[in-house]
Image: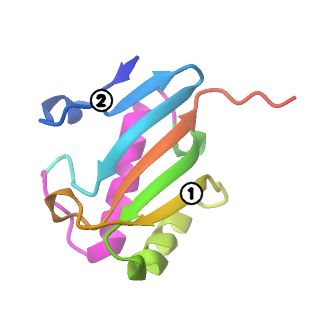
Amino acid sequence: KKIETKYSKNSSGHYSAGVISGNYVFVSGQLSVDPETNKVPEGGIEAETLMSLKNVERVLTEVNLTKDNIIMCHVYIPDIKLWDSVNKVYKEYFGEHRPARVVVPSNSLHGGCLVEIEAIAEIECKLD
């Protein structure tokens, strides 16, 4: 099942904002673009990291999930030197919740963004 937000419906990219498969939600990479203004927020990597995380959560909200349902994140940044700043915001955002994560240094990102985050969330967790 495809997941779209009111913002992703206007995207020219050939992808869904998220896809439900089985008990999982796969959230496509969310850039650090403010969907209300279609601009990258001012404030550098920290502001952009927070925006990307909020964009991931916007997709999850469409299916009544929250950041607490996230079990894995892939974080793409253009320079590994940004890791500490990204980690600081990531830690503040998730608090005690600690999804698995990988941070991947990449070349430049679309639109000049400094961060893109994709996520996997679990719809229902059944522990025996």
- In-front residue for pair 127/109: 109
Q: Which residue is mark 2?
A: 16
Instruction: Find numbered disc 2 in the image and state the secondary structure of the residue it sits on.
Output: loop
Residue 106 percent coordinates (x, y) = 34, 66
On the image, which quarter does residue 4 sit in?
A: top left
Q: Quadrant of the N terminus?
A: top left
Say above or below: 13 vs 1: below
| Stretch of the chain drawn in magenta | 38-65
Residue 11 percent coordinates (x, y) = 15, 36
Relative to 2, 119 lies left or right: right
Q: Residue at x 41, y 26 (%)?
A: 19
Q: Which residue is mark 1?
A: 101
Relative to 33, 23 lies left or right: right
Q: Residues within 10 Å of mark 1 (few under 14, many from 20)?
A: few
Query: Which residue sits furthest front?
Result: 107
Q: Label 1 vs label 2: CA separation? A: 22 Å
Asked if the stretch drawn in magenta spans residue 58, the answer is yes
Query: Which residue sits furthest top?
Result: 1
Marks 1 & 2, CB-CB < 8 Å contact: no
Q: Main secondary structure of the magenta part?
A: helix
Q: Earlier in the sequence, mark 1 or mark 2?
A: 2
Residue 117 percent coordinates (x, y) = 39, 53
- In-front residue for pair 123/75: 75
Q: Residue at x 22, y 63 (%)?
A: 113
Q: Residue at x 13, y 32 (%)?
A: 10
Asked if the stretch drawn in magenta spans residue 77, the answer is no
Identify the amino acid type marked 2: Ser
Relative to 20, 24 lies left or right: right
